[in-house]
């Protein structure tokens, strides 16, 4: 008899596991302990030899690899030869049709979940593709499509997803890992060569244009001229450094602005800064913003579609019109004038908001209960 499993087919192979792998682990524990069902994950070949695979090994989560191409049904069937998937759950966009084909040719009793973690793109061509895929295939063979944020939910609804199949489940974070500890704050700043007196703003800029690195740098140039104790960190690699090097405003900042490499544990890095900035032009769900909020940081954030409905309701999240660097600079200047007690209050407010609304335990339970309902319908 083949072993029943929940099968995750993930277009994921990043250098660091981050919140995505941590979420899969929490969900696998829920399924094991509450549903008595094991978990198996399928990743593209680029995920081979990633250090985060050891975490799956420790939890007893099975996994395998497939080529990054559309027609991989045969390869996935081979990986699942001794397993019976009760749910085929795809993450991101690339392998979503694979779940439908697998159900059609091999696992006819399996439920199908598509999980969209970002917006797919708003070109006319993309909207037509989404509509055809959802209306002709998913509405017929799929069970539920999970959106991680309001913008993503709007996209799948506009594409014609049948009522009852679309579900909005905000991502969750492990709040215990983001406790704000003063000794770590000092240690990180020492490693970065930043003094206790400096006020540090940080932005994640791995995709510089989407993440608004240009907006951040222009605002930083404005503030850096007035306040010499302000420092600005952009997290990114060569692509981000190349982008920053072509911004005219950066030359005036000198050593006050630096592009630093990402680290495996973002929770350590964010503990060493004072204010987290998100200047994104587009976002599915701002994992980094939620994690910074959990670490009791004040947030300066562009007012884009998913923000106001999710974390924008917290008093410690200050919003400004997207791409308006002058308004961002104005918020930066306001934050410079805050007392330590005021920053602490706003940070604690943010952490309480995350614990109440975005804990990874709540997320695991919501997805796990969805599985339970799907499996029960097929018995």
Image (tube, rainbow, N blue to C red):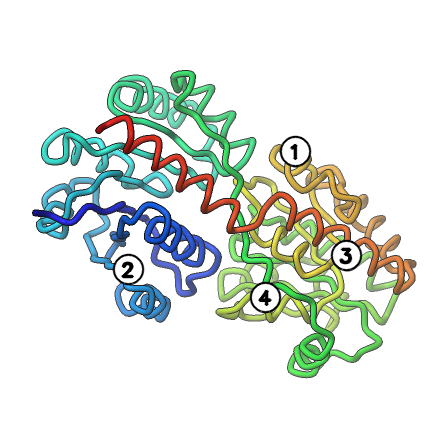
* Residue 309: mark: 1
- Whether 295 is drawn above or below 116: the answer is below
Q: Residue at x 71, y 79 (%)?
A: 183
Q: Which residue is mark 3?
A: 347
Left or right: residue 149 compared with residue 375: right
Earlier residue among tags 1 and 3: 1
Residue in the foreground of this view, choosing between 205 and 196: 196
| Dot in front, 2 or 1 | 2
Q: Which residue is mark 2?
A: 61
Earlier residue among tags 1 and 4: 4
Q: How many marks?
A: 4
Residue in the foreground of this view, choosing between 141 and 219: 141
Q: Residue 123 appears at what percent x and percent y?
A: 45, 27
| Dot in front, 2 or 3 | 2
Earlier residue among tags 2 and 1: 2
Q: Residue 365 appears at what percent x and percent y?
A: 46, 44
């Amino acid at each position: 008899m083949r072993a029943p499993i929940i099968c995750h087919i993930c277009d994921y192979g990043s250098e660091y596991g981050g919140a995505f792998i941590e979420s899969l682990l929490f969900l696998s524990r829920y399924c094991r302990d509450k549903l008595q069902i094991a978990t198996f994950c399928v990743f593209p070949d680029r995920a081979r030899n990633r250090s985060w695979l050891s975490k799956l090994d420790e939890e007893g989560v099975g996994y395998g690899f497939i080529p990054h191409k559309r027609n991989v049904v045969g390869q996935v069937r081979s990986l699942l030869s001794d397993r019976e998937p009760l749910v085929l759950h795809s993450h991101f966009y690339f392998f979503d049709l694979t779940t439908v084909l697998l159900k059609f040719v091999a696992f006819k009793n399996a439920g199908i979940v598509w999980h969209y973690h970002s917006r797919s793109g708003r070109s006319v061509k993309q909207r037509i593709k989404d509509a055809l895929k959802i209306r002709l295939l998913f509405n017929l063979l799929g069970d539920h499509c999970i959106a991680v944020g309001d913008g993503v939910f709007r996209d799948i609804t506009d594409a014609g997803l049948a009522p009852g199949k679309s579900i909005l489940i905000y991502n969750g974070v492990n709040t215990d890992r983001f406790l704000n500890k003063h000794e770590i704050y000092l240690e990180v700043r020492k490693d970065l060569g930043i003094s206790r007196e400096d006020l540090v703003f940080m932005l994640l800029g791995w995709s510089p244009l989407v993440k608004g690195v240009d907006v951040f740098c222009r605002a930083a140039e404005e503030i850096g001229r007035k306040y010499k104790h302000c420092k600005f960190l952009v997290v990114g690699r060569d692509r981000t450094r190349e982008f920053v090097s072509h911004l005219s405003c950066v030359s005036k900042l000198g050593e006050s602005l630096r592009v630093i490499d990402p680290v495996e544990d973002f929770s350590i890095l964010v503990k060493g800064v004072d204010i987290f900035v998100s200047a994104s032009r587009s976002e599915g769900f701002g994992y980094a913003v939620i994690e910074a909020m959990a670490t009791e940081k004040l947030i300066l954030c562009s007012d884009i579609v998913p923000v106001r409905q999710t974390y924008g309701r917290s008093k410690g999240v200050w919003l400004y019109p997207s791409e308006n660097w002058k308004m961002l600079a104005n918020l930066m200047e306001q934050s410079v004038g805050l007392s330590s007690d005021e920053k602490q209050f706003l940070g604690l407010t943010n952490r309480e908001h995350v614990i109440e609304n975005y804990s990874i335990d709540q997320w695991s339970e919501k997805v796990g209960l969805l599985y339970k309902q799907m499996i029960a319908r097929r018995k």
